[in-house]
Structure formats: structure tokens, C-alpha cells
Amino acid sequence: MSPRVLVSRLRWGVLGLAALAVSSSYYEDDVIGPIADLLHQQRGFSQSQLGMLNAVISIPNVALALISGVLIDRCGPARVAFWSAAVGVVGAALTAIGTPYGFMVAGRFIFGISEGAIFIALIATLARWFPRSGIALATALYLSLARVGSYAVDTSTAWAHPLYERGWQPPLVLGTAVTIAGLVAAATLYWADRHRHSPTEVTVERVKWRQALNFDLSYWYILALHVLYAAVFFPFRTTYVIEYFQHAKGLTLQQAGVANSWVFFAAIFATPLFGLLADRFGSRALMLTVGTLLLPLTFVVLGLTHLNLWVSTVLMGISFSLVPAVIWPATTLLVEPHRLGTALGLITLIQALGMAASNLAAGRLADWAQAGAQNPAGYAVMLEFFFILSIAALTAAVLLWRRERGPKGHGLEAAGSRAN
């Protein structure tokens, strides 16, 4: 068998290993949400303390956004992915030990080091295995399969229900076991990458930091959309929504977990579909505007109506499937190829700060309003906060759409991909 044929057959296995590794990272990332109420009852945690457990994950990303590319280029992406997975296991284990609270925060911080590097390292690894003509599909599938981890942790309140009945700690131990499975996948991927016969060569452009702020206006609009969208979606869905469903909507823990999980479950299948539609028909900025519009509508439905809870789940599920599927490839069309790494690094850095700040602000607002099972109305101020952020995100999307429809556009509304 020729080396080229061997690599062609192995690359789909490599994609599967990468998906398993990143999916385990997503699982541990979201592990706090399902046990939020247990931490309130059994540990006496405040909303601010819960917010800190997820906010602290974003802090290492500020530094990693600037240095991970250098590490990947010097050491190899598969090796960095393996190292990152190992660090993730350490962080998950410390989180599972969980006492005292500062120890738990330290575990989440260490896990954040892993999460910040492994996502980028695995994408870079796929770029070494897949040709340019196939990397877009591979990346879309990678993103979709990553959502399996988020879906699994939300549904764990049902399929791992006996663990939740035993208290806050067993679900965290399960999260550690999941990260160990991800480490095994990353180690196997590293072995395969070291022994591959004909890797796809990747040309690395040197980052020019002096040009970091010299971007087109469309880039700044899409950067704002990246940051604001993430600052709404991830803090709400991964930190507060399950507890909110329990206290304000009267759901059990299992029902709340399942309702939240369907947002991620839908993204597993719909993300590649929206990506293909954007490539086929264009209208990327318009699609981003429509997808972002669903965010404030979700909070209107939750806060001002008595519609079935699944209405908000469907709205946010479509939004989360559409926006990520379009925003990343659209970003690549706005920036010259030799500056794309700098552009994405800047987005990652500011996005991490935005998610951390949003998590902390939402927790403090909920504490200030004394939100909880005895005061469900206190969650209104948190919903208003996320609504305002989502309106700001929608404004950025509309500005991007208007600019791309004019003479200074970059072809986002045209069918096909300029990059190809």
C-alpha cells in the first residue's frame, strides 16, 4: 500500500480521535452547570462563586491566544494537543477533589490552560492530514462532533442520575474519567502523527505584531460579534441556565439538563448544514444577522412570555448551529492569509476576556437580586443583562451586513468562497 493511500485512509481515524479529544474537553468545560444547584445546597456556594468557576477557565486563554501558535509551530500540533490533554486531566482531578473552594478554582484554572490550547492544536493537526480541498469539511465535522461533549454532560443528569443522587462530587469524578478518555485519544493521535508516512505540509506565516491593529472595519465588526455572541451564549447556557430552569421554570434537574442539551444536540447535525448552505448560496453576513437576532428573541420568550420552554430551546439551538458555522469561515474571508493567525489570536484573546467578564457580571447581578429557588423573580436582572449584550451583538452583525452589501465588501454575500 502506498504512503499516500495509507494517509488517505488514516485521516478519517485521525479526525475521529481529534473529535473525541475535543469532545472530552467540552464535557469537562460544561461540568459545573448540571451540579450548580447541588453546589448551592451542599456547599453553600453563591452565584458569584459559581460564576468564578467558569470565568476562571477563560483567563489562561488570554496568554495562550498569543503563544499557542508559537508552541504548535515549534513542537508540533499533535504533541501540544497531547500535552494539553494531560494538563486537562490534572485540572479535572483537582476540580473533582473540590475542597476547599480555592482548590476547586485552581483546578478550573488549570483545566482552562488545557482548553485554551487543545482546540487550536487539534485544528492545526487536522490541517497536516487533510488537503486544502477537504479541510473545510473536516473542520465542520470536528466542530459538530465537539458538541457531543456538551450534549453528553447536559444529559448526564439522566443517564448518570445515580451519581447526581450521591451529591456534587461523583459527577465531577465522571468528568475526570471523560478527560482521561480524551487523553488516550490525544496520545493515540500523537502516535499516529509521529508515524505518518506522508503528512500534508503546512506553510506557516510569521506573525507581524506591529500589524495587529491594522485591520479593515469589517474585521472589527466581526470581532465584536465573536466576542459579544460568546459572552451571551456560553455563560448563560453553561453556567446559569440549568439552575434557572429549575428555580424559575419549575423543572427537575433531569428535565433542565435535557432541555439545555438539545441546543448542543441540534448543533451536532445542523452546523455542517449551515456551512454548506453558506458556501452554496452566500449571504454570510445576512445569515449571521438572522442567527444573532434569535438571541434577544430567546430572552424575550424566557422573560416576558409563558410559552413552552422548548420554544426558547429551539430558538437558541438554531442560533448556535448557524452562527458558529458561518462566522469562522467568514472571518477568513475578511483577512489576508498571511495575517489570519494574528486576526484569530486577537479574537480569541478578547473573546476569553469577554466570557470571563460576562460570567462574573451575571453572577454578581443574580446575587444582588437574591435570585434563587425562594426568589425566582430575581433572575430577571440576569436575563436583562444577557438581552442587552445580545442586542449589542445584533448591532455588530447588522453593521457588518450593511458594509458587506456595499462597495467595500469582501464577498461575504457572494456564493462560493474567495479562499478557494
Image: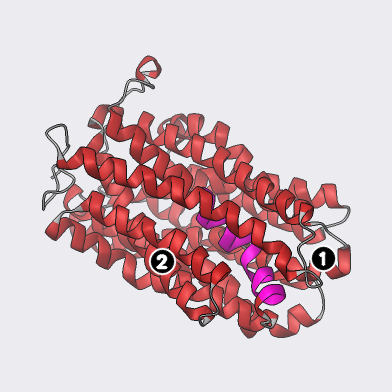
The correct choice, above or below, for 202 with respect to 272 in the image is above
Q: Residue 40's mark?
A: 1
- Residue at x 55%, y 41% (from the top left corner): 354
The rendered magenta stretch, by its main secondary structure, is classed as: helix
Dividing the picture into quarters, in which one does residue 14 lie? bottom left
Label 1 SS: helix
Q: Mark 1: which amino acid?
A: His
Q: Sort mark 2 into few (<14), some (14-19) or many (20+) by Cα contacts within 10 Å.
A: many
Q: Can residue 155 be seen in this snapshot? A: yes
Q: Mark 2 points at which residue?
A: 145
Indicate yes or no whether the magenta region holds residue 323. no
Total numbered badges shown on the rendered structure? 2
Mark sitting earlier along the chain (2/1): 1
Q: In which quarter of the image is the N terminus?
A: bottom left
Q: How far apart are marks 2 and 1 (CA)?
A: 32 Å
Q: Give the range drawn in magenta.
A: 231-248
**Closer to viewer: mark 2 or mark 1:** 1
The answer to whether the residues at label 2 and label 1 have Cβ atoms under 8 Å apart is: no
Q: Can residue 111 be seen in this snapshot? A: no
The correct choice, above or below, for 379 with respect to 248 in the image is above
Label 2 SS: helix
